[in-house]
Every structure is written in structure tokens, then in C-alpha cells.
Image (spheres, helix red, strand yellow):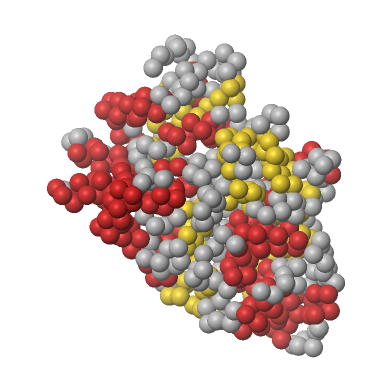
Amino acid sequence: MDTITRIFDLLEHSRNNCQKPDMVACKYNGAWKLCSTDEFLNLTDNLSRGLISLGVVKDDKVAIMSTNRPEWNICDFAIMQIGATQVPMYPTLAENDIRYILSDAEIKIVFVSDQVLYEKLDKARKQMESDLVIYTFEEVSGADNWTKVLDLGKQNPDTDLKAYQNQVSPDDLLTLIYTSGTTGTPKGVMLTHRNLVSNVVESSVMYPAGFKKALSFLPLSHIFERMVIYMYLYLGVSIYYAESMETIVADIADVKPHGFTTVPRLLEKVYDRIVAKGSALNGIKRTLFFWALNLGLNYELEGKNGILYELKLKLANKLIFNKWRDALGGNILALVSGGAALQPRLAKVFWAAKMPVLEGYGLTETSPVIAVNGLNIGQAMFGTVGKAIKDVEVKIAADGEILCKGPNVMKGYYKNPAATAEAIDAEGFFHTGDIGELIDGKYLKITDRKKEIFKTAGGKYVAPQVLENKFKESIFIEQMMVLGENQRFPSALIVPSFLNLKDWCQRAEIPFISNSEIIKHPAVLEKVQGEINHYNQDFGQWERVKKFVLLPAEWSIEGGELTPKLSLKRKFIFDKYKSHIDTIYKNSERIEI
């Protein structure tokens, strides 16, 4: 492969090695629109020349606030290859965060996808009395379209882009990403070309031969999906963007991808739907389904279950799991999961069904991958995030915090040397804020966020993520937040899986009128209590959830309860449901389970 030292070197790499009619594709109004390698490169170069004509110079900040689409990638490369810095902005950002980022990064130009986002940015521009220039990808009345910048570039074909590229070094700033932290002011993470190139090259070795087509639906504004897109281009993989989160299943059926990146939440939903369909079967079909499922849930890597088990699994794959694979297009070679802990049972059953899930771990500040499980012998261990990638050193501090050092670690926080010094110590180790351990001295296991571990009134420490991850193995628990800081016992806010609850109610002949009504039904409360009792057995007395409240609506990004990578915004949830929490602990007697 060509030597890549700056991310925009992927353009020439694609020209020389990966010419194809579908370098990038996107689904618009139910139809796929393909963008060839030549078309992509020409649009990128024209946009770069247009930006130069507008006066954009090296180190200027240009933002993109858009859903996933080829225009996002074209703008990204057009900005970076002239030495400017790309600032991704989540489409779901709150107004105050939009104003803060525009001001802090001193952004000159923003590309947005549609009218809704244009109006958001236009409102911020007026409130700030700013001369910010906004271009839209879609036609929006009264707004400048991005084709104006492209046309400017076409009018200046003699602008030598090579001269601009030559001014960019591997250690120059590629992107400035504002963390979507659950509390406090966003911090701008400075990532260089070297940071991302190291991650792209070392993560790419995990992908199997024959992986040539991928579906993408996680937000490009997040470094996880963005780095993976760069990696796809490095490997010559065609990228297909799903039309929306609601159309993913149909889009998978259309594209038949070799894989995609995901978060555990989506895999949990896929698994729950499959189990729900299995539960609806009758007779021998139902028996075979759950026989295969139980085999999968007991899967161990590298044939450790023995020959008899492997023979049974081969039969299960032929009779049952082949239908699972067909539901995901029939061509899956690998799935990559990140952003939160993956339940080991999910990893096991997907591996058993010949759709291996490679769980990884990292942060925006680490470009993002620190460690990841691989497909080959000795590269994976269930319940861990695998081994550190090449050139990245991981060690565990005395208090259990995970520290890492390597070419993937950020340059620092923008305009915030104090926060940088707090995050990166004198030896160059980045302090992740996560608690973990090294199994067998090499497989990294994450146990919790350092800041999320709380102490009960009895002085005992509780790691909420460990409990939440275990309890969500129940098909009746969709989402859960464990709390109890300075209280006598842990409790939980629970969003039930209403899909599975509805099926259970039907079998139990309980009328399902609405979500808000069913969570008050004594039989439902008793059922969930039974699930709590079952999973509590895995924990010490001081850790066990003693009380819970069922909530009627699923948490979401739009509702403010989840970050863009679907992590819990704990403070927001705590504040939103404070009255429920107060009820749990008000005059509460100690409950023994």
C-alpha cells in the first residue's frame, strides 16, 4: 500500500489503488446514489479551490454540521488538504453548545445538510451578531448552497493544491472535536494527522480479507465512525450510508454489507427482536430455536467447548443461525462494537452464528482506538476489549485507572493547557478516566468510569456500569441507570423492553393499554422484581439493587438522556427524574433481598 502520513494522502491512495464506481454511496428517498472515485476526487479538489478563493488559509477552522452523506466526506477532505482544520458538530447539539463551539473555535464557515440545521445555525449567527458564512448541501430557500463554493473552484482550475498539501506536516492539526461530555463546558480535542493515521493503519489489520463493502450509520461527527471511514478508504472498502436509523434493516438487506460499526445498544435490539420472533414459534421449530440459542450463549473461542459441541454448533448454524445471517444481509464477515460495554452473552451468540463482533475501546482523545479484539487465534477474549493496538502502551494506575501512551494520544485540549496537563502526565500517559484491569497481562477489561463509581452511606463502593450491563441481559430491561450515592442502598431507574413486555402480557392475558399504564400493573412490577432478584445474586449485598422505578418512555439523544454515542447522560437523567428518586429514598426502610 502507499505510505500514508497525512489523512488526505488517502485521496491519492484511492486514485492509485481503489478506483471504483461506489467509493461512497448514500440512500436518498429510497434510492441509492453512487459516487465514484473520480467523481469524489474531482469534487474534493474543486471544493478545496473554492475555499481558497473564499480566503480560507492554513489553520482556519471550518465546521460541518450534517447527517452522514458523501458531501460530509468531500468537505472533510477539501478542508484538510489545504491545511485548514475541520470542526465536526453534532446535528443534535443544543443551542448554547453551538454558540460556544462557534465562538471558541472562531469558525468562519459551516457546511450544513438541510433546512432544520440551517435554521439552527442562522439563529446562532444572529444571536452572536457574527459574520459566519453558512452553506447547505440541500436546496434551502434563502441560503447559499455548497455548489457555489464548488463553482468558485471550477473557475480557478490552475490553483495548485499540491503546494497547499506540501505545507501540511503529520503533526499539524487535522481536526478539532468538541467532546459531548455529560456535564460542564465542551472541551476541544486537538487531533493531528499523525494521531489518526496511526489509528487507521494499526486498526486496519483487524479486518478480514474479502471485506469490501460496509454500511455506515453511526454519526460521522464522532471520531469512532470517522476513523473507521478513513480506514475503509485505506482498505478500498465501499461505504454505503444508511438513509436513517429507522431504515437500517432495509438498508442492510439492500447493501448486503460485509460488516458495519455499531454500539451495543443496537446489537441488543437486534438480539431481542430475534429472541421475540423465536418465542412466537411453536412446536419443534421453537424447540430448535432455543436449542441453538442456548448453544450460542455458551460459545467459547478457539474450539474450547470440544468436538461434540462444535458438531452441534455446525448443525445449529445450518438450521437456525443461517436465518440470523440472512437477516443481516448474508455476507457479514465482522462487526465492530464500541462506545459502551458489550454484554459477553451477545458477543458469544454472534460469534457462534458466524458474525463475529470485535469489541474495542477508546476515547476521542485517543483517536479513538486503544484496544480491540481481533479475529485470529489469541487476539480475542470475551468480556474484554482485546489487546492494545500496535505502538500503544497501556498500564493500570494504583487506583485502577487505565492509562495509555502512543501516537494516537491527542495533541491536547484547545486553548486549555490546564486541562491538558491534568489529562496527560509528565511521562506522556493519557488518563482515560476509566477503571480496568489487564487479564493475563494483555487483554484489557473495563469495569467502570472512574467518575461514575459512587459510595453508599455505608462507605461501600458501587460500580454502576457493571450492574447495568448485567441487568440488561434480561429481555425485559431495555435501559437502566443505577444510583445511590450517599444513600443506604443502590436503586435503579428502568426503562422496560416494551416489545418483550407486550408479548409477555399477551401470554399472561394482561391487557396492554399503554406504556404508562402497564408499568403500574402489579403483575408487571412483580415480573421485573423477579428479574432484579435473579441478577442481584451475582453481586455483593451492598451492591444489590433494592428498589426501582419503571419509566414509560425510552431514553434518546433527542430527549437529552443519551450522548450521540448512546451513553447515559447521568446528571441529566438524575435531574429529570429527581422526584422519582426522592420517592425511592424518602422514608425508605432497608429492604433485604
On screen, residue 436 above or below 305: above
**Left or right side of 499 for 229:** right
On screen, residue 493 above or below 66: above
On screen, residue 394 above or below 47: above
Which residue is at the far front?
Answer: 307
Residue 500 occupies which quadrant of the picture? top left
Q: Nearer the viewer, residue 445 or 115?
A: 445
**Left or right side of 48 for 118:** left
Q: Residue at x 45, y 55 (%)?
A: 356
Q: Nearer the viewer, residue 391 or 350?
A: 391
Expressed as whole percent of the image width and height from the top left, the position of residue 535 reads 39, 28
Residue 589 occupies which quadrant of the picture? top left
Expressed as whole percent of the image width and height from the top left, the position of residue 77 reads 69, 71
Q: Nearer the viewer, residue 578 or 23?
A: 23
Expressed as whole percent of the image width and height from the top left, the position of residue 104 reads 78, 52
How many labels, in total? Answer: 0
- Indicate the quadrant containing the C terminus: top left, top right, bottom left or bottom right: top left
On screen, residue 408 above or below 431: below
Q: Residue at x 65, y 59 (%)?
A: 202
Q: Residue at x 61, y 65 (%)?
A: 231
Expressed as whole percent of the image width and height from the top left, the position of residue 418 reads 83, 40
The answer to whether residue 221 of the structure is visible from this angle is no
Q: Residue at x 15, y 49 (%)?
A: 284
